[in-house]
Amino acid sequence: MAPVSTRNVVIFGEVGAGKSSVINLMAGQEIAPTSSDLLRCTLHWAEYQITFKNGSQYNVFDTVGLREAPCLQVGEYLSAITNAYRLINTLKERGGINLLLFCIRAGKVAACQENYRLFFEFLCEKKVPLALVITNLEGERRMEDWYTRNRRYFDKYNIRSVGHACITTANLLDGSYGDKYEESRRILRKVVEVHCNASMDSEGWAGAR
C-alpha cells in the first residue's frame, strides 16, 4: 500500500472571519483555540494535523492577518510580514503549499484585500490554488445563495479563486444550525479535497528556486 501523502494548507484572513472555527469544523473536533486575542501583534502561525475519514491527511497552518492587530507599529508590521515570509520558507522545506484557504466573513469582502494581496499575490506569486471560505452564513436559507448574490464583488476587487465554500461555523448548544453546521463540514472538506488532490501527482508550490 502506497504511503499517504500529507498536504500543506495555509488558512488566512482577518480577525472575526472565524479561521480557528473553520479549522475545528474541518477537523471535526476542537483542536484550535477560538477566543479572540487582540493583543496578538505578530504574524506567527500555528500548525494542526487533520485527517479526514477517507484517510487523507493535511497539515493546516493558521496565520494572523495584517489587519488583525490594530496595535501594530511600523516595525511590528514589518515583522509580521517577515514572519509570513518565514512560514512560506518553512513550507518550502516540507513539500511546499498545496492550497490557500482565504477566510472571509460575509459582508467584509472590501476590507479583506490587504491579506489577499500579501499571501496570494506577493508571497505565493499567484501560483498556489486559492479557495474562498465564506463564513457567518447561518442566517441564509440556502448558504450558496450568498455567493450567487455577491460574486460580482470578488470580480470588482480582482479576488481570484479556484473554488469556494459557503458555510457557518455556528453550532450552538441548543442544536440551532446543527444541520447547516454538518452541511458546512461536508462542503469545506470537499473543497479542500478537490483542490488539494487536483495536483496529487505533483509537489506543492515551494516558491522561486
Image (cartoon, grey):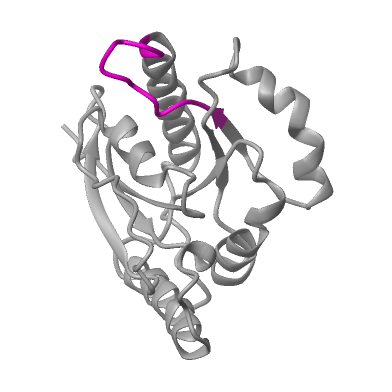
The number of numbered badges drawn on the structure is 0
Q: In this view, does 39 lie to the left or right of 134?
A: left
Instruction: Give how far across and how far down residue 148 sits, in percent.
Output: 74, 23
Residue at left offset 50%, top offset 37%: 195
Where residue 124 sits, quadrant-wise, is bottom right
Task: Work out whether residue 115 or residue 18 is closer to the camera in this orientation and state it.
Answer: 18
Q: What is the residue that sits farthest to the left in this orientation?
A: 1
In-image side of 100 versus 185 (left or right): right
Give whichever of 102, 202 is nearer the camera.
102
Q: Is residue 91 visible?
A: yes
What residue range appears in magenta?
165-178
Write the residue at 45% across / 68% down: 69
x and y, in percent, of residue 204 in the image: 43, 56
Q: In which quarter of the image is residue 180?
A: top left
In this rendering, the answer to whether 101 lies above or below 43 is above
Residue 126 visible in the snapshot: no
- Magenta run includes residue 177: yes
Left or right: residue 191 compared with residue 153:
left
Residue placed furthest toward the bottom: 75
Closest to the observer, 156 or 204: 156
Q: Residue at x 43, y 72 (%)?
A: 84
Determine whether 32 is above or below 112 in the image: above
- Asked whether residue 160 is drawn in magenta, I would say no
- In the image, 85 versus 33, the foreground residue is 33
Question: Picture quarter containing residue 91?
Answer: bottom left
Residue 137, percent across and down? 55, 25
Magenta residues, dominant SS class: loop
Instruction: Pinpoint residue 33: horizontal percent, then vertical percent.
Output: 24, 47
Quadrant holding the N terminus: top left
86 is higher (above) or lower (below) than 156: below
